[in-house]
Amino acid sequence: MIRKILKWTGITLSVAMLAAVCTYTYMSVSMRSRMNKTYVFDQESIAIPADSAAMARGKHLVAIKGCQDCHGSDLAGKVMNDDGAIGRLVAGNLTFGKGGLPADYNASDWLAALRHGIHQDGKPLIFMPSHETTLLSQQDMAALIAYCRQIPKVDRVLPANDLGPVAVIMSYLGKMPLLSVEKIDHNKSMIARADSTEGAAQGQYLAISCSGCHRENFKGGEPLAPGFPPVPDITRSGHVGKWTKAQFITTLTSGQTPEGHVLKNEDMPWKMTAQYTRSELSSLYDYLQSIQ
Ligand code: HEC
Ligand code: HEC
């Protein structure tokens, strides 16, 4: 009797394991083929300015859009993550140094990356938040590209991306934004310029950068990856709803909330939000407070 039970337990376990292996293999093959797909979009071009106001705006955008959190403070790229579970995620060298962008990487290639989420060869960018940069106004896009194209060359050759099992499963299930090319509405054209007067409209434009983590409705949700804290609601119905504008600004510039909670920059990039102007933070507050 015992033997029979053991035998059946063994068989059941083997079947379950085989099923798990098959499911994983299927997910992995499917993700690999999505990552290797070649996309073709109409080539776009925009006038790239060279004046000092545009350069300053581009520099500010690099700071407040978190480009440096992933691509490094010199934008010459870095290995963002390297472990057995998520795997190796690498944000490329954006300079024209060794290991960086090819010498013929032109403004249309920048647009293809920032608007459509693809490399120069049409392959999808992995883990680059192009679904957010695609919503930049044409004026901001041009300033961003103008600034990035003239940053000092840095020689840095980085290893290739190599996804681990957790990244494969989470992105297959749509819980990790690996392929922004699949999320973008590629027919949507850029707005000419964003509202730059302080207030909720400007806040809405800026808050696109918060939506990747705090979700599109800003109501937060599950942790972004295993081992990270849950993402809080930052609308009127969350803590932010009880804070004054001054408290909100202090939180986003110091990393400490009125409740005394200390935000780690790796979880909530407050060193990025600290670089928003007071006026931009004020607009963000107005917008978030307007969401019930
Ligand atoms: C969440 C992290 C993250 C942020 C934030 C981010 N990037 Fe990236 N970016 C990546 C990764 C990862 C890649 C590499 C994708 C690949 O190799 O498939 C990448 C690739 C790129 C590429 C394409 C380079 C190439 O080799 O084709 C450009 C251009 C780029 N990023 C510009 C920017 C700019 C400008 C910003 C700020 C507005 C920015 N990125 C913000 C992670 C990020
Ligand atoms: C990379 C993901 C990420 C991005 C981008 C991000 N946040 Fe957060 N944010 C978090 C996480 C995670 C926490 C919770 C951290 C913790 O519990 O320690 C948090 C916490 C906060 C808090 C504290 C809320 C509370 O209830 O204490 C505020 C306010 C906040 N974020 C605002 C913003 C705003 C505004 C933006 C956009 C400008 C933004 N965040 C962008 C991940 C992010």
Image (cartoon, rainbow, N blue to C red):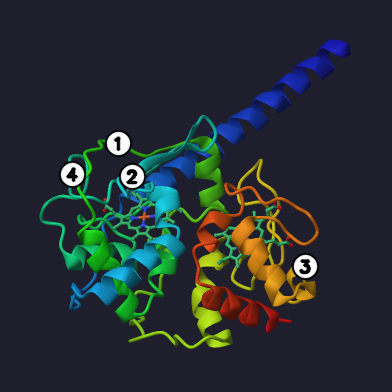
Residue 42 badge: none
Circle 4 residue: 97
Q: Amino acid at mark 3?
A: His
Q: Residue at x 32, y 50 (%)?
A: 75
Percent across and percent down for residue 199 are: 57, 86
Percent across and percent down for residue 89 are: 42, 41
User: Mark 4 or 2 closer to N-term?
Assistant: 2
Q: Amino acid at mark 2?
A: Gly
Alpha carbons under labels 2 and 1: distance apart: 8 Å
Alpha carbons under labels 3 and 1: distance apart: 41 Å
Q: Quadrant of ligand 1?
A: bottom left
Q: Residue at x 18, y 44 (%)?
A: 97
Circle 3 residue: 239
Front residue of this view, candidates 279 and 231: 279
Image quadrant assignment for residue 58? bottom left
Quadrant of the image containing the N terminus: top right
Of all residues, the one furthest to the top in this rendering is 3
Q: Residues within 10 Å of mark 3 (few under 14, many from 20)?
A: some
C-beta proximity under 8 Å, tags 2 and 1: yes
Circle 1 residue: 158
User: Mark 3 or 2 closer to N-term?
Assistant: 2
Circle 2 residue: 77
Determine if residue 174 is in view.
Answer: no
Percent across and percent down for residue 94 are: 27, 51
Quadrant of the image containing the C terminus: bottom right
For disc 1, does the CB lie below 8 Å from ligand 1? no
Q: Going by the image, does 63 lie left or right of 45?
A: right
User: Mark 4 or 3 closer to N-term?
Assistant: 4
Q: Residues within 10 Å of mark 2 (few under 14, many from 20)?
A: many
Q: Going by the image, does 284 lie left or right of 159?
A: right
